[in-house]
Amino acid sequence: MLINGARLQLQDLSIVYDGQITAVDSVSLDVEPGEFLTLLGPSGSGKTSILMTVAGFVPAASGRVLVDGDDLLGRPPNERNLGMVFQDYALFPHMSVAENIGFPLKMRNWSKADIKQAVDGALEMVRLTGYENRRPTQLSGGEQQRVALARSTVFDPPVLLMDEPLGALDRQLREHLQTELKRVQSRTGITTLYVTHDQQEAMTLSDRIAVMRDGRIEQIGTPAELYDRPATRFVASFVGETNLFRGRPTGSGSGAMLETGNGGQIPLDGIADLPRDEMIEISIRPERLTIGGGARCTVEATIVEVGFAGEMIRVTAQTSSGDQFRIKQQNRGQAGQLSAGTSIQIGWNPEDLVVLEQPVD
Ligand SMILES: Nc1ncnc2c1ncn2[C@@H]1O[C@H](COP(=O)(O)OP(=O)(O)OP(=O)(O)O)[C@@H](O)[C@H]1O
Ligand SMILES: [Mg+2]
């Protein structure tokens, strides 16, 4: 089954509750046909509001929502032809699995034979063949979500909206269903707008991620772009873990340094065109830091803490001027050589260092 995914566009979309609470502030977004795009952001950043407005349950204060160029705003939800899976979007308890999945087709006056064929295909896709006669109460949480996914895609909608569909499930089941979801999505080619506040889930599933903050999109890009080139401190710390340092750049070329508040010096070797006499902020990921010599940029530090996490070792180290580095290394049996109080050299390549846009605060 291949659905022809549509282009979903949000243009200057604003959503205001009770005439005064601006939940979404002039958001513009193009989701390409067949793309899996995730809205990622903390609680209250406006993710659900966007989905509810696209679905037709919450009005827009201004802006447009287009599917293949057609404006959806003003149409009731049942005339928008969108697939929807929400965290608590319950199945009909009095209907069997097959009846639940077939419901959208019955509403569209499909024939019994066509419904059966489509339901069988949908069941196979979510790997629930043989479950057609069960009631929702006879299913596990993960199975219920798979039925919800089948029900929301069985009528070949051009766009699928999902709001934290795996939020209520335990980690193992969530990871399993992430794989299933991704498989169903790429098999059907359905354009997907997904919502989560779980950055790991967003990175695993998405073609692109829009990071939301206070009703706006702070940055949009592929998971790798957001992780490797975060634009702001907010994105750098929301998408993955990071080390942040603020200070003034001094020197130039290979002698360029970031002077941190307490007289610390962090090498910026090779980073060109830094603003002078201005505070800047840099980000470097813990796993890009090495312990021991050989790197282009190095600082001397003392280990403060070593954390053992199975396949990873986490080391916190501090320079003499008090700048703290968090380092993440793969466990290759070196844990014994790392202990609090040991002097080490922390190293990195200048390409792994990101200069962030000026913090607004
Ligand atoms: N029905 C409503 N009436 C008034 N304000 C609302 C309503 N729904 C949401 N809000 C407000 O709009 C803002 C955005 O809420 P929204 O539900 O879109 O956030 P979210 O990003 O989905 O958060 P979460 O991760 O907690 O689900 C919040 O400040 C919230 O308090
Ligand atoms: Mg929400």
Image (cartoon, rainbow, N blue to C red):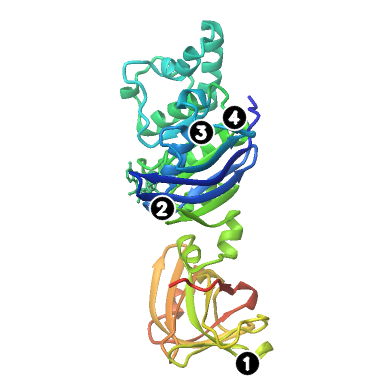
- On whether ligand 1 comes within 8 Å of the CB at mark 3, the answer is no
Q: Secondary structure at mark 1?
A: loop
Q: Look at label 3 and name its amino acid.
A: Leu
Secondary structure of the residue carrying tag 4 is loop
Check disc 3 and report its element: helix, strand or loop: loop
303 left or right, relative to 183:
left
The quarter of the picture where residue 230 lies is bottom right
CB of residue at label 2: within 8 Å of ligand 1?
yes
Q: Which residue is mark 4?
A: 158
User: Residue 73 has which mark?
Assistant: 3
The residue to which callout 2 is attached is 45
Q: Measured from the top left, where is residue 306 in percent x and y?
A: 39, 75
Q: Residues within 10 Å of mark 1 (few under 14, many from 20)?
A: some
Picture layout, residue 150 above or below residue 231: above
- The Cα atoms of the two marked residues, 3 and 4, are separated by 16 Å
Residue located at (37% from left, 51% from top): 44
Give the percent coordinates (x, y) of residue 275: 61, 82
Q: CA distance from mark 1 to mark 4?
A: 55 Å
Which amino acid is tagged 2? Ser
Q: Quadrant of residue 67?
A: top right
- Residue 251's mark? 1
- Please state which of the two labelled residues, at mark 3 or mark 2, is closer to the viewer: 3
